[in-house]
Amino acid sequence: MFWKILYLLVVVFYLSSVVEGSLGFASVAVGETFEFDFGEEAKDIRINRNSAEEILYAGKQGKYPNVKLSDKGILTISPVTENDFGMYSATYKIEKRVDDSIIGVAPPAVVLVKKE
């Protein structure tokens, strides 16, 4: 019983550290160009800024014309404006089967903040 509990705690610790590892922070000044590679799996991303949520699809026009997601999963914001600061996260799932279990990992996300 002890080993089962220990194993469970190790798995929970591992997953929590992996989830935190998927979140990045970046700072950029207004007027600069910002790029972030979400990976080729990213066909859309969720954008949260100023309490508003938007889904941006690869190759499609979003709410703001300066924010684009390429078919290769590269987010480009050019030029960065005051409206662009917020959280950008991929929506795809990363799952791996281990024995009879499936381990899920959070997709990449980046919080974009203003460089002072």
Image: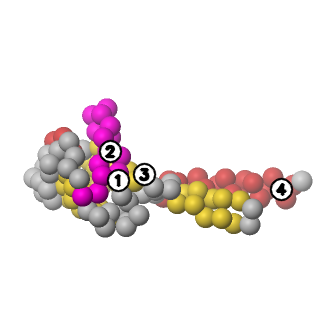
In this picture, residue 53 sits left or right of residue 7: left
Task: Name the residue that disc number 4 marks.
Answer: 4
Please, what is the three-letter code of the amino acid marked with disc 2? Ile
Q: Position of residue 15 (x, y in %)?
A: 61, 56
x 77%, y 59%: residue: 7
Q: Give whichever of 113, 40 is nearer the camera.
A: 40
Q: Are marks 2 and 1 in contact (CB under 8 Å)?
A: yes
x 24%, y 58%: residue: 59
Task: Name the residue that disc number 3 marks.
Answer: 91
| Sequence order check, earlier mark of 2 and 3 | 2
Q: Are marks 3 and 1 in contact (CB under 8 Å)?
A: yes
Magenta range = 45-59
> How far apart are the alpha carbons under marks 2 and 1?
7 Å
x 42%, y 57%: residue: 108
In this picture, residue 85 sits left or right of residue 18: left
Q: Are marks 2 and 3 in contact (CB under 8 Å)?
A: yes
The correct choice, above or below, for 41 with respect to 65 in the image is: below
> How far apart are the alpha carbons under marks 3 and 4?
33 Å
> How far apart are the alpha carbons under marks 3 and 1?
7 Å
Q: Secondary structure at mark 3?
A: loop
